[in-house]
Image (spheres, grey):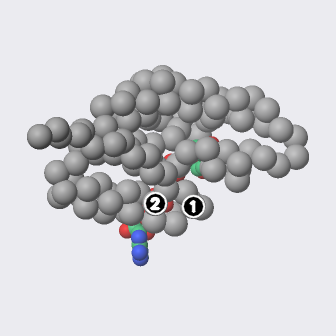
Amino acid sequence: MTTHAPAGLFISFEGVDGAGKTTQVERLRDYFAGMGRNVVVTREPGGTELGVQLRTMLLHGGDIAPRTEALLFAADRAQHVAEIIVPALERGDIVITDRYLDSSLAYQAGEGN
Ligand SMILES: Nc1ncnc2c1ncn2[C@@H]1O[C@H](COP(=O)(O)OP(=O)(O)OP(=O)(O)O)[C@@H](O)[C@H]1O
Ligand SMILES: Cc1cn([C@H]2C[C@H](O)[C@@H](COP(=O)(O)O)O2)c(=O)[nH]c1=O
């Protein structure tokens, strides 16, 4: 009999600050873990070591020009995808991220970018 490894699954939670994303991420993680699945919970910005530094710059740094800000979020995402998301999906894990690309569309797509 052939057994197949489970396919990876990528899920992002989006919403305004305080909407309840982290709460739902944790509930879904517990649900999938209860099914015996490997779950990687992560977030943007700040899902990697480099991302933690970028998060500090972005959320607690000084004045950042809109285009620079957009590029820093994109840099955080590029590292996140390469270091965390793709390897986890290749292992067949479930990746649940607290924010992803839609946050950039919502927050950075305005005038000046
Ligand atoms: N369904 C809900 N009903 C009422 N309160 C909730 C619900 N879900 C979460 N909360 C509460 O709302 C607050 C914000 O929740 P949470 O941290 O999950 O939101 P978030 O979207 O991740 O926030 P942030 O954007 O600041 O990271 C917390 O105090 C949490 O306990
Ligand atoms: C990914 C991403 C995030 N943001 C903003 C949205 C929030 O105000 C903060 C992140 O804070 P949280 O406590 O982790 O929710 O960053 C953004 O403007 N653009 C993005 O792409």
Regarding residue 43, the answer to whether it shows in the image is yes
How many numbered marks have been drawn onto this rendered protein structure?
2
Residue pointed to by mark 2: 21
Q: Is residue 110 left or right of residue 18?
A: right
Distance from mark 1 CB to nearest ligand 1 atom below 8 Å = yes
Residue beneath the point at 51% across and 63% down: 18
Residue 19 pos. (x, y %)? 52, 66
User: Disc 1 marks which amino acid?
Assistant: Gly
Q: Is residue 3 left or right of residue 22?
A: left
**Figure quadrant, ligand 1:** bottom left
Residue 24 pos. (x, y %)? 39, 63
Distance from mark 2 CB to nearest ligand 1 atom below 8 Å = yes
Name the quadrant of the N terminus: top left
Residue pointed to by mark 1: 15
Residue 63 pos. (x, y %)? 73, 34
Residue beneath the point at 48% across and 24% down: 82
Q: Quadrant of residue 58?
A: top right
Circle 1 residues within 10 Å: few <14, some 14–19, many ≥20: few
